[in-house]
Amino acid sequence: MTIEHFDVVVVGAGISGIGAGRHLQTRCPERTYVILEGRTHIGGTWDLFRYPGVRSDSDMYTLGYSFKPWTGAKSIADGPSILDYLHETATENGIDEHIRFGHHVNAASWDSATARWTVEAAHEGKRVRITCHFLFMCSGYYDYAKGYTPDFKGTGRFKGKIVHPQCWPQDLDYAGKRVVVIGSGATAVTLVPELAKTAGQVIMLQRSPTYVISRPAEDRFANGLRRWLPPMLAYGIVRWRNVLLQMWIFNLARARPERVKKKLLDLVRGHLGPNYDVATHFTPRYNPWEQRLCLVPDADLFEAIRAGSAGVVTDRIDTFTEKGILLESGKAIEADIIVTATGLNLQFLSGLDTTVDGRKVDFSTTLGYKGMMFSGVPNLASSFGYTNASWTLKADLTCEYVCRLLNHMRATGTAMATPILDDPEVTPEQWVDFSSGYFQRSLHEFPKQGSKLPWKLHQNYARDILLLRYGAVDDGVMAFSKTGIPEEHRA
Ligand SMILES: Cc1cc2nc3c(=O)[nH]c(=O)nc-3n(C[C@H](O)[C@H](O)[C@H](O)COP(=O)(O)OP(=O)(O)OC[C@H]3O[C@@H](n4cnc5c(N)ncnc54)[C@H](O)[C@@H]3O)c2cc1C
């Protein structure tokens, strides 16, 4: 069997993988690359999630790519429009010609003697092997096979339908039905107002509240600016305004949580009126931006609550019953459909079985370098976006850095780039400092970040520009060599 070889193998054709294709072909035109995608379509998240009303929860001027202006009227855009944008990016740049669909990558083994990865993928029931110099994981951050559902008691007794938003049945008829949406995150607050348009009754059942903030779906400043300025210039201005605004709010929330909390809750009171129990249903136990803030466009969730077509119940589930849900307070909610908007199962590098020179890599014992490479693991990067801002901001910068690294290796005639941790002052810290349940459930499987640069994750676009776009590639921590990593530095 002949084994194909590429300079770079990209895994995944979502926002990150398509972006990687574009950056590779413009910044490293002499490098060959292939994108291996496990599914049959591009788009990743934006193709997988098909629940009613699916939309972005950050603005498209920062969720869009740096190189392709978002020109849609809506700043908080629906899933199909985002998917169209990704298709357009892939086709107009010829990236689609580099994608191999139906290739689910399971394993990758690095051999220092040849300075190559051998990547193994399952394709139509067969095992396919491809070798490459550099492996770029753009496989997202959660398990595609199944969403997260807590172990609720009595689910087998429920006579209605139980649905997880990650695999929404396209023929699900909820018109006139009583629907309970379990959850209080981005998916729940998206689903509730959308379902409420036709369902008989919609209840958002949450164990504890989340901060919810309304923003206009359409950005009038951005739409106005586009009429006067060339699209790329208008896009750049709005993008930077949004980046700075987001950074300011995040930093303010961390520095003065009480002040931001009061402001957020006042805004909710303004939407729901003085008689609504904001203390119970919209006042979280944590401070703003200790978890992701939930964005709702044009106050649609609050409008649905005010109109009486949706309601919020804050309580704990005791058990599912034949007719619905019995709560710990003793109250019962009847339902025809129960939606478990209870989240994702986080998964690091898609569970890739990785070996370096025959030794299995346990990524949880490695330290992330610049948030994208891992101590002791050569020629492998992964795209992991921001948790406090749009994913694509970091994904774009990650691609830029990977291209700079590849160009540096070409210029210096080196075959291996390995982040080496040999600073005794660096102490490990959690990969992400968010208290959200879905992070906390899985963080032990993730690499750690370090207490100082370049192992420290900034979660700050401006600082990352300095580090990734302009920082030295040969920084004394990244070891470049022709072949072979010293035994003591292997992951
Ligand atoms: C419902 C929802 C809404 C979101 N809204 C926002 C938002 O508004 N703003 C924001 O910043 N973020 C948002 N996110 C986070 C979102 O996932 C990222 O913004 C972004 O889409 C991630 O892109 P990605 O390409 O890195 O990963 P993904 O979109 O997850 O794509 C990964 C791709 O890799 C493929 N893949 C995975 N493993 C393998 C493998 N082993 N072999 C081959 N292929 C593989 C997958 O099939 C998929 O196509 C949202 C997430 C969800 C679930």
Image (cartoon, grey):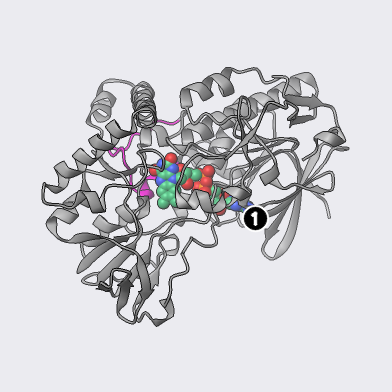
Looking at the image, residue 377 sits to the left or right of residue 300; the answer is right
Tell me where residue 62 appears, x and y as whole percent: 40, 32
Whether residue 44 can be seen here: no
Residue located at (48% from left, 52% from top): 438
Residue located at (36% from left, 50% from top): 186
Residue located at (36% from left, 52% from top): 185
Disc 1 residue type? Answer: His
Closer to us: 309 or 250: 250
For disc 1, the neighbor class at 10 Å (few under 14, some 14 to 19, many from 20) is many
Ligand 1 near label 1 (Cβ, under 8 Å)?
A: yes
Which residue is identified by label 1?
A: 103
Looking at the image, residue 479 sits to the left or right of residue 212; the answer is right
The quadrant in which residue 315 appears is: bottom left
Whether residue 149 can be seen here: yes
Query: From the image, which quarter does the C terminus lie in?
Result: top right
Looking at the image, residue 234 sits to the left or right of residue 268; the answer is right
Looking at the image, residue 142 sits to the left or right of residue 51; the answer is right
Residue closest to the far right: 113
Tell me where residue 100 appears, x and y as whole percent: 63, 50
Query: From the image, which quarter does the N terminus lie in?
Result: bottom right
Closer to us: 24 or 176: 176
Magenta span has 84? yes
Magenta residues, start to end = 68-87
Q: Is residue 326 above or below residue 301?
A: below
Tell me where residue 359 appears, x and y as whole percent: 82, 47
